[in-house]
Image (cartoon, helix red, strand yellow):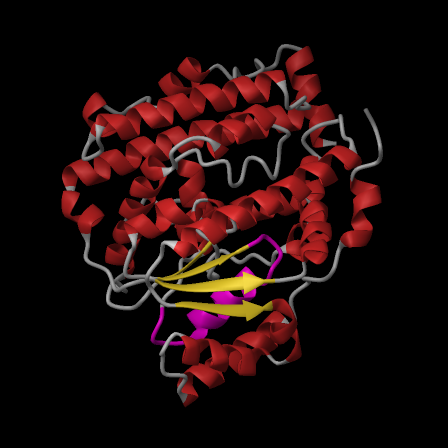
Amino acid sequence: MCDRLIETVWDRGWDEKPSLDPDYLWTLGSKGYSKEDEYSIRSSEDVEDLRLRLERLCASLREEAALNSLGHTMAYGQLRNAIRKRHALGRLWRERPELASTPIAPPIIVLGQMRSGTTRVQRLLDADPKLAGTRFCDSHDPVPSRPDLRPLKARAALFMARRVNPWLDTFHPFGATQTDEEIGWLSAALSPAAFEAQWRIPSYVAFNEGHDQTPVYREFARMLRTDAATAKNADRPRVLKCPQFAEDAKALLDQFPDAKVVRCTRAQDEVHASSVSMVASQMAFQSDRHMLADLEAEWARKIDHRERRLDQALKSFSGPVAEICFEDLNADSVAAMASLYKALDMSFDRSARDCMKAEIEEAGRSPHRMHREQIEHLLPETG
C-alpha cells in the first residue's frame, strides 16, 4: 500500500523522487550547519571516511539494491538523517567539546551473533541498578535536546515502523525508552550494521569488511561519552551491544581497552535460521526482487565472517571475557547470569537478582517469538 502510494505521488508529479546522489544528500543533510560543525573536534580523516562511506553506499543502493518506491524513500530518509545528525553532533561538540571526552566507567560489551541472545543478556545486565544501558530513543537520535523530545520522536518512529512492518516486535521487542542496542549510533557513522539487514548492497558490505573501522568507533566513543554525560550515568558501567560489534571487535575494544566482555553463543544453524527470518522481514517491504537462496547463502557467509573476526579480536584482548550460551539462558536465565557475574568478578547481589527476575517476567509478556515460519510469506522465490 505505502509503496503504491509513493509511486503514484511521483508519477503524477505531486513530488519529485528524491535523489540518492551523495553530493545532493550531503548538501541537503548539512543545510543550516557550517563547515566548522562538519569538522568540529573530528579529524579530517574521520570526515573523509564518512564522505567515502556515503559515496560507496549510494552507489550500491543505486546499482544493486533494486529498491522499490518505499525502499528508495526509506534509504533517502535514513541517509539524509544520518548526515544531519553528524552535523548536529559537530555543532554540539563545537559548543561543548568536553561532552565528547567525558570520563566513563569501563563498559561491559556484549559480543555475539545476531539472534544469539545478545539483547536478552544486555537487558538483564541493565536491570542491575549498578549498571546502565542506552535508551532506544537515545540510540535513534544521539543529539540531546532541552526539553528532551527524543522519547516522543521515537514513539512516532516506532509507530510508523510497525505500520510498515507488522512483524517488527516479533523478532525484537522495542520501546521508546527501553534499553536497546547502539545501532543508531553506528548508522550515524554509516556503518553497514542496519543497512545490510534492509537492503541488498553487496559491494558496500565488501567495502566495509575490508576497510578500517577505526573512524566509526572514534565517533561511537564520542557519542557514548556524550550520552553518559547527559544521562548523568557516567559513573556506572554502560552495557553495550550490537551484533556488528562481533565483526568490528578489534576497533571497538581499541577504544575501550578496560572493558569487560560477554560473548554470547548459540548453535550456528539456529543463528542462521533466525537471522534470515529477521532480515527477510525487513527486506521484503523495500524491494520487489528477492531470492531466498541468495539471502541464506549471504548470511551463512556473514555469520562465519563475524565469528572469525571475533575470534581474532579476542585473542589479542587482555581483559576479562565471560561466555554465556543461549541454551543456558533458556534453561535458567538467573543461574546463567549468576555464573556470568562470577566469571567477570562482579557482585551478583539480591538487588541484581530481583531486578533481573522482574525483567524476565516483563519480557515474557512481549510479542517476541520464533518466526522462522514467516520466511516463505515474506520472501517468495522471485527473481
Residue 195 falls in image quadrant: top right
Q: Nearer the viewer, residue 356 or 110?
A: 110
Q: Is residue 85 above or below residue 32?
A: below
Q: Is residue 310 above or below residue 361?
A: above
Residue occupying the point 46% across, 31% down: 210
Provide the residue span drawn in magenta.
Answer: 113-131
**Residue 145: in sight, yes or no?**
no
Residue 300 falls in image quadrant: top right
Q: Position of residue 231 (x, y in %)?
A: 29, 59
Q: Position of residue 112 (x, y in %)?
A: 53, 56
Q: Is residue 255 above or below residue 43?
A: below
Residue 262 falls in image quadrant: bottom left
Residue occupying the point 19% across, 32% down: 40
Extreme residue in the bottom direction: 350
**Residue 257: in sight, yes or no?**
yes
Was residue 128 drawn as part of the magenta stretch in this picture? yes
